[in-house]
Amino acid sequence: MRFPLNSCRKARRCRRRNRGRRCRTKASGEMLNHLRALIHERIVQPITASNAPVAQLSWGVAVGTFVGLTPTMGVQMYLAAVIWGVSRYVLQFPFNLAVAVAMVWITNPITVVPLYYVFLVTGSLLLQHGEALSYTHFAESFEHVAAMENAWESIIEGTRFLFVDLGWPMVMGGLAYAIPGAILGYFLTSRLVTRHRRQKAAATNMSYERWQAINEVMY
């Protein structure tokens, strides 16, 4: 029995579309798994493994979240370290540097382009600058910067692109998320870490205060 030629072509097109969908679904799943692993390794573990006081951890998360949600990728870890140095040695107000550095990984090679584009669109809306760049144009420009071989040239060109070419919409859009993100990060960390440590204290038949005295280490 012979099938009409058009039916065969349609069947082949359907199979190709289905294969494409499966490939895209698989790629998306792999990317999500990689992102989860990255978040757990870079962000969750430094917090749960630390014995720093809850307040120092919470401030570390707040500072790291703030820096991580500003368009400063490439210098974020250095920026967190500078803030820590000023806070510790000038203001005499230490926070956990390791956790702050970990939190800047909110922006990472997987999330940076969509996050920064959200900043740009948000800033354009807040400042009423009209329509922002298309996502495709933005992603291509960012990929061009990231592809530079010299790291410092890439940082300088990226800074020029974000702060000069895109300007205030990018800055204001980042701050629109960085400030509430830092506040939310502080209170969530304080609540969750305290609960986690109370559970650890209960598991060892200790009062929470006793567990703190034995295990928490000031930095």
Image: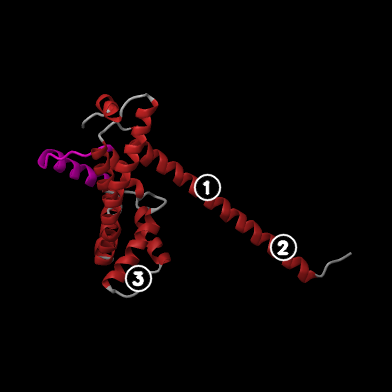
The secondary structure that most of the magenta stretch takes on is helix
* Residue at horizontal 35 percent and vertical 41 percent from the top: 192
The magenta stretch spans which residues?
Answer: 77-98
Is disc 1 surrounded by few (<14), some (14 to 19) or many (20+) residues within 10 Å? few
Q: Nearer the viewer, mark 1 or mark 2?
A: 1
Q: Is residue 93 magenta?
A: yes
* Residue at horizontal 29 percent and vertical 74 percent from the top: 129
* Residue at horizontal 10 percent and vertical 41 percent from the top: 90
Query: Whole-percent x and y of residue 98?
Result: 28, 37
Q: Nearer the viewer, mark 3 or mark 2?
A: 3
Question: Three-letter amino acid code at disc 2?
Answer: Arg
- Describe the element under mark 2 as helix, strand or loop: helix
Residue placed most toward the observer, 177 or 29: 177
Is disc 3 surrounded by few (<14), some (14 to 19) or many (20+) residues within 10 Å? some
Instruction: Decide: is 10 above or below 207.
Output: below
Which residue is disc 3 drawn over? 132
Query: Whole-percent x and y of residue 54?
Result: 27, 37
Task: Find out whether the residues at labels 3 and 2 contact each other: C-beta distance under 8 Å.
Answer: no
Which residue is disc 1 drawn over? 30
The quadrant of the rendering that contains the C terminus is: top left
Q: Earlier in the sequence, mark 3 or mark 2?
A: 2
Question: Three-letter amino acid code at disc 1?
Answer: Glu
**Distance from label 3 to label 2 (Cα)?**
40 Å
Can residue 143 be seen here?
Answer: no
Question: Three-letter amino acid code at disc 3?
Answer: Ala
Q: Which mark is residue 12?
A: 2
Instruction: Decide: is 198 above or below 81.
Output: above
